[in-house]
Image (cartoon, coloured by chain):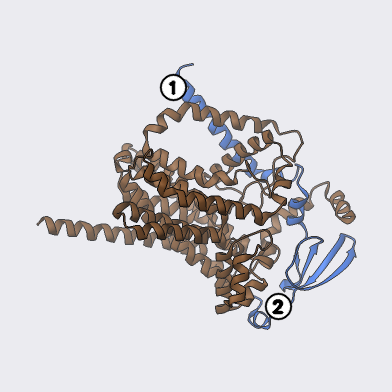
Amino acid sequence: MKYPQFKALALIFALIVVFNNLYLAEVYYNISSINLSYNFYRQSGDDILIDNKVEKVQILGESMDFGITHEIKTDAGKRIIIYQVKRDSYRKKWQPR
Amino acid sequence: MTKFISRALKSYKSLRDTVNLGVIILCVGLIYWPVYKFRFLHGWDDQWAVLNFYTERGYTWSNIYSILTSFYEGQYAPVNQLYYSGLYYLFAYDPMYYHIASVIIHLLNILLVYYLIKKIASKLSESTKLNDQDIAFLTTLLFAVSPFNLEPVVWVSASKVILYALFYLLSMHSYCLYLTNKKPQYFYLTLLLFVLSFGAKEQAVTLPFSLLLLDYIYKRKIKDSIIWLEKTPFFIASFLFGYVSIESQGKDLFEISNFYSLHERILLACYTGSEYLTKLLFPLNLSYIYPFPFQAGESKPLYLWFYPIAGITLLLAYFEGLKRQKWLVFGILFFIIHLILVVNLLSLARFSIVADRYVYVASIGFYFLISTLFLKAFKKTCLKRPILALGLIYLLYFIVYAHAHAYSWTNTLTLKDRLKKTIRARNDYDALKTKLQKQ
């Protein structure tokens, strides 16, 4: 193989990689079919904001700085409900948009 | 007469800078104007990274001492924490001001990128044979509006990235001043800004290599002992900063990184590097997290083996040619220096293989390459109009996609919506719930 042909081949290889990456992005990174790590599930799964306020339902395990925690068992699994305690300044300024 | 022409030329250049920056700022405004109504992301780190006791205690001596001397949730970012404390002192926990502050820092970074690339492009004019303002304009425009650079601007917890970039770029400017007029105060200022940059994010440890790259651009002889003597305090600081970063992450860093074997990490590094390149060039379906293509110990998808082969072939085919083009050397090395720490070769203490925010500074090198290539093609071709039209369509795609993607960062629900639906639609979701119940 001559040098210009080798250069063309290298370019074709690079294009194949780019197109494969674009294909993976198009199928949303195979999230619906590949094995995902536990942490990936956890970070994508069950966070819920109740009435868009500061209360929060989380899967057990995510750390919080401050708040009142209450553990419950639901059909969906064991969860901790965390009622975050906010300073008055934040509560006063907080307005639903 | 000569004086008049030189003054007119200077004022024309300065006017062009103003117009260039005006256009860029306008484009940034078009993308980021909705941020004033964005919330804190209570389900994506803001609940502990921003809303915390350090933020609320303000600028008291004891709080500043605590921030400077302790690790928090596996992180050491005192400059970033002091930034939150300042915002809290001024605006309490009103998310609007935190978001606006992020956009302002992004704008400052844009100014710094513009003038840095202008300086570098003028030094590389023999190699590029292009106007420095054209290269600076196009590079900065792509950097400013790239959807891939959106994450650290719209996510308050990622402000450490834009802050680190701010001090990092200032440090590079200061070093350029030192190289130009050799005043020692600029050298010390570079060192101080380096420390501040690390105080915002550990990725700053790469600065000594960027300074060596500037030495190369300014035609200093890399073999001179003075160059290495100058870099000694920077390398020592980098080493210390690296140690602090490892300490802050504790045992987890090594425990998790050991999950993937070395050959798996090499495969992942090739894949990750190519993902960053592809997403910078054609951002598509961007997300706040991206999965690893396989779990440790699993069989690897066949296509992954092709990535290192393609990389090695490309290197062998173009390495000799690259060495002769100084502008290519700068762009490629700038990109690699700022990406090497996050391609999963060393650490896998994460569950997302790619993170948009990690490429913020590295993207400058990549967009410098794209801009220079585009301008060279534009200069040589007789099809100026079609090429210009293609360039404008590409730019429009960036702006429209970045603006649309910004809305997904409005709150936790909008951010996680698509991923949540995709995962809940999986056949094995019930099995996962059972697994979680057991834990």
* Residue beneath disc 1: A4
Residue at 33% over, 40% down: B128
Identity, as a three-letter code, of the amino acid under mark 2: Lys
Query: Which sits earlier in the primary sequence, circle 1 or circle 2?
Result: 1
Report the side of B391 relative to A76 (left or right). Answer: left
> Closest to the observer: B98 or B225?
B225
Asked if residue B78 lies left or right of residue B226, the reply is: right
Residue at mark 1: chain:
A
Q: Is residue A24 above or below residue B87?
A: above
Whole-percent x, y for residue B8 in the image? 18, 59
- The answer to whether residue B104 of the structure is visible from this angle is yes
Q: Determine the CA span between mark 1 and mark 2.
A: 66 Å
Q: Which quadrant of the figure contains the C terminus of chain B?
A: bottom right
Provide the chain ID for the residue under circle 2.
A
> Which of the chains is brown?
B
Image point 58% across, 51% down: which residue? B242
Quadrant of res B87: bottom right
Q: In this rendering, is residue A15 above or below B230?
A: above
Chain A rendered in what hue? blue
Q: Who is closer to the viewer here, B134 or B256?
A: B256
Residue at the spot 67% in from the left edge and 71% down from the top edge: B52
From the image, which quarter does the N terminus of chain B lie in? bottom left
> Does dot 2 land on a helix, a strand or a loop?
loop
Residue type, numbered disc 1: Pro
**Residue B97: image x %, image y %?**
55, 73
Q: Which is closer to the viewer, label 1 or label 2?
A: 2
